[in-house]
């Protein structure tokens, strides 16, 4: 959505939803068993130190029991992943049917460069008196490609377990100083990046952000009641790379497409990005 367009805002927002409220009933659960197995396998690897072995087994137990409580702050609670979903295909019929208001919605096509320029704003951290003064922070990484199916998830989790083991060894050697919360957050983010093979047609990429146990979500109405979400901010005007952040917008294949396209062009002119391409969906659809 375009936040504050009538006020001449230079930013827009994507809504990242608490992953547990998405349409996949196995979100954040699907890869749990495999992650636990790979962490335990890494713990029993030849040459593993007793300290790292115990840490890997403790993390595996946390994951098994869905225990992601944060300890970095006195007021911190459980961390949850918030997910904003993107699709490589901008005009996919199944996407229009499942997520595009029955063909009456719009598909926003971002320039690849802008995907590294999303920001979060954590109001609760600003209000603390313990040194958090920044109003916004860039996401640690751009969107990642979702992993589908058991075999690919197995390889993905094995890589995660190996990297976690290596990080723990560096902590043991005094080279790095990680808090335990970091391991839980990394595990949670990794779990939010895998899905059942039945969803593979979506060819999804995801922004995955978490609140570190302290953030305050907003709420919207959904099919199951209240849905927690956070906002990810991005520039509407040309970014640091000079390319338009929003390259194109596809008007869904539902009714009154030309009229909807005209209203969209007026909105784009109003918020200062008239060069964004507007095109009509080519997907065959009868509402």
Image (tube, rainbow, N blue to C red):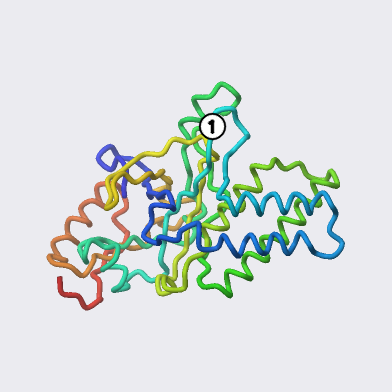
Is 134 rendered above or below residue 83? above
Q: x, y percentage for residue 113?
A: 49, 58
In the displayed structure image, the side of residue 201 where residue 179 appears, left or right: right
Q: In the orientation shown, which residue stands out farthest toward the top?
A: 129
Q: x, y percentage for residue 233?
A: 42, 45
In the displayed structure image, the side of residue 98 where residue 195 appears, left or right: right
Q: Residue shown at 15%/74% (left/top)? A: 286
Judge by depth and name the residue closer to the eye, 168 or 237. Answer: 168
Secondary element at image label 1: loop
Q: x, y percentage for residue 213?
A: 53, 38
Q: Residue shown at 48%/55% (left/top)? A: 207
Residue, disc 1: 134
Q: Residue shown at 48%/30% (left/top)? A: 124
- Circle 1 packing at 10 Å, graded few (<14), some (14-19), many (20+), is few
Q: x, y percentage for residue 50?
A: 84, 52
Quarter in which the C terminus is drawn: bottom left
């Amino acid at each position: 959505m375009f936040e504050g367009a009538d006020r001449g805002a230079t930013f827009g927002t994507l809504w990242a939803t608490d992953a547990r409220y998405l349409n996949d009933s196995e979100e954040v659960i699907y890869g749990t068993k495999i992650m636990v197995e790979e962490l335990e396998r890494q713990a029993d690897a030849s040459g593993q130190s007793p300290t790292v072995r115990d840490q890997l087994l403790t993390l595996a137990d946390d994951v098994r029991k869905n225990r992601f409580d944060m300890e970095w702050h006195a007021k911190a609670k459980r961390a949850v992943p918030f997910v904003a979903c993107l699709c490589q295909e901008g005009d996919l019929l199944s996407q229009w049917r499942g997520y595009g208001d029955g063909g009456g919605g719009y598909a926003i096509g971002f320039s690849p460069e802008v995907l590294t320029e999303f920001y979060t704003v954590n109001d609760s951290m600003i209000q603390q008196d313990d040194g958090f003064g920044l109003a916004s922070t860039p996401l640690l990484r751009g969107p990642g490609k979702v992993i589908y199916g058991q075999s690919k998830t197995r390889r993905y989790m094995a890589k995660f377990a190996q990297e976690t083991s290596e990080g723990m060894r560096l902590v043991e050697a005094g080279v790095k100083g990680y808090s335990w919360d970091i391991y839980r957050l990394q595990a949670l983010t990794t779990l939010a990046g895998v899905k059942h093979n039945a969803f593979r047609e979506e060819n999804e990429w995801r922004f995955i952000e978490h609140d570190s146990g302290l953030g305050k979500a907003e709420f919207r109405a959904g099919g199951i009641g209240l849905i927690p979400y956070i906002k990810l901010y991005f520039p509407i005007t040309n970014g640091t790379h000079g390319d338009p952040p929003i390259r194109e917008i596809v008007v869904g294949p539902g009714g009154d497409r030309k009229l909807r396209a005209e209203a969209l062009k007026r909105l784009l002119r109003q918020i200062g990005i008239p060069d964004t391409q507007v095109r009509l969906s080519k997907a065959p659809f009868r509402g």
